[in-house]
C-alpha cells in the first residue's frame, strides 16, 4: 500500500506493525541515466518486494513516500545533483520513522538505493532501535544481489535496472559517450586510502563501469533478486523479537 495514494481509514485498518521507507538520491548518473536513478530503483524494489511479501502472507504493508535527496555532495560538480548533510539526512529519516511508529508501524525496513547513504543509515537505524519506539534496519538493494555485471556508478547494474523499469529515461544515444568517458573503478586509491573526495577527480563524465553491459535482461534479473531478498528480510523483521 502506497501511503501517498491511501486514505487515513485505509491505513488505520491495516493489520500489521511493519512499514517500508524508500530512500534514494538526486544526483548525476552520467550523460545517459536520470538524476533520480537511486530514488527510482529504491521505489521499485520497495513496491515489488512488498507485493511479493503480501502474496506470500496476505498481509499488506504501508510504503512511505520516498526520501529523494540524500548524502551526495561527492557529485556536486555535475549539474542537477542535490545533497543534504549527514546530520540532516539522519534526522529526517529518524523523524519519519518516528511518525510511522506513532501510528503503530514500529518495525521499519528502509529500502536504500544510494551508496552514499549507507553509513548514515547504519548509524541512524542503530539509534532508532536503541533509543526510540521503533525497530529499524536498512536494506540496500545492490548489496542483496548476485549478478555477473559490476555495480559501478551509472554503470551496468544501474543502467540495466532503469532499462527494465523506465526504459524511456535512458538516453540510448549517449551510451557510447558514457562508456568512453567512464572510469573503470571508483576512487583514486593509494595505500588503501581513497585520495579523491569528489567523483569528478576520477571520472570525466560521472560514470564508473561500462553501461553497455547493462542490458534489460540483466535489469529483470536484478529486480527479481532484490525483490525476493526484500521479501525474505520483511519476513525476518516481522517475526524478530527486538532487544
Image (cartoon, grey):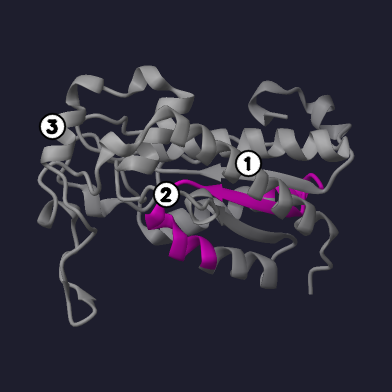
User: What is the quadrant of the N terminus in the image?
Assistant: top right
**Residue 150 image offset from top left, x and y in percent:** 35, 51
Q: Do the numbered discs 3 and 2 sit on residues whose CB atoms are within 8 Å?
A: no
Marks 1 and 3, how far apart at CA: 31 Å
**Residue 184 image offset from top left, x and y in percent:** 19, 54
Magenta stretch bounds: 99-122
155 up-or-down from 198: above or below: above
Say whether residue 43 is visible. Answer: no
Q: Which mark is residue 148?
A: 2
Question: Which type of secondary structure does the marked residue at label 1 adopt?
Answer: helix
Q: Do the numbered discs 1 and 2 sit on residues whose CB atoms are within 8 Å?
A: no
Relative placement, left or right, of 57 versus 192 is right
Specify the farthest residue to the bottom. 191
**Residue 225 image offset from top left, x and y in percent:** 59, 44
**How many numbered dots are placed on residues in this image?**
3
Question: Which type of secondary structure does the marked residue at label 2 adopt?
Answer: loop
Q: Earlier in the sequence, mark 1 or mark 3?
A: 3
Marks 3 and 2, how far apart at CA: 23 Å
86 up-or-down from 126: above or below: above
Mark 3, residue position: 177
Labels 1, 2: front one: 2
Tell me what residue is drawn at x 30 percent, y 43 percent. 155
Marks 1 and 2, how far apart at CA: 18 Å
Please say whether residue 25 is one of the residues in the magenta stretch: no
Please say whether residue 115 is one of the residues in the magenta stretch: yes
Q: Which mark is residue 227?
A: 1
Circle 3: is it few (<14), some (14-19), or many (20+) Cα within 10 Å? some
Q: Earlier in the sequence, mark 3 or mark 2?
A: 2
Question: Which type of secondary structure does the marked residue at label 3 adopt?
Answer: helix
Relative placement, left or right, of 52 versus 146 is right
Amino acid at each position: 500500500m502506497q501511503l501517498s495514494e491511501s486514505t487515513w481509514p485505509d491505513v488505520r485498518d491495516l493489520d500489521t506493525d511493519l512499514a517500508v521507507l524508500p530512500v534514494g538520491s538526486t544526483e548525476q548518473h552520467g550523460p545517459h541515466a536520470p538524476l533520480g536513478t537511486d530514488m527510482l530503483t529504491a521505489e521499485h524494489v520497495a513496491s515489488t518486494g512488498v507485493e511479493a511479501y503480501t502474496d506470500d502472507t496476505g498481509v499488506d504493508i504501508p510504503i512511505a513516500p520516498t526520501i529523494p535527496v540524500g548524502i551526495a555532495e561527492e557529485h556536486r560538480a555535475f549539474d542537477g545533483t542535490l545533497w543534504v548533510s549527514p546530520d540532516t539526512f539522519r534526522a529526517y529519516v529518524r523523524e519519519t520513522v518516528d511518525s510511522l511508529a506513532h501510528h503503530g508501524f514500529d518495525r521499519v525496513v528502509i529500502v536504500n538505493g544510494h551508496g552514499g547513504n549507507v553509513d548514515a543509515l547504519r548509524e541512524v537505524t542503530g539509534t532508532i532501535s536503541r533509543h526510540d519506539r521503533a525497530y529499524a534496519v536498512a536494506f540496500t538493494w545492490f548489496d542483496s544481489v548476485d549478478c555477473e555485471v559490476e555495480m559501478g556508478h551509472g554503470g551496468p547494474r544501474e543502467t540495466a535496472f532503469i532499462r527494465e523499469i523506465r526504459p524511456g529515461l535512458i538516453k540510448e544515444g549517449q551510451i557510447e559517450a558514457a562508456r568512453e568517458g567512464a572510469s573503470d573503478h571508483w576512487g583514486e586509491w593509494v595505500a588503501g586510502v581513497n585520495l579523491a573526495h569528489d567523483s569528478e577527480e576520477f571520472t570525466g563524465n560521472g560514470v564508473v563501469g561500462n553501461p553497455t553491459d547493462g542490458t534489460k535482461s540483466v535489469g529483470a534479473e536484478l529486480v527479481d533478486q532484490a525483490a525476493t531478498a526484500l521479501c525474505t528480510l520483511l519476513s525476518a523483521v516481522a517475526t524478530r523479537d527486538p532487544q
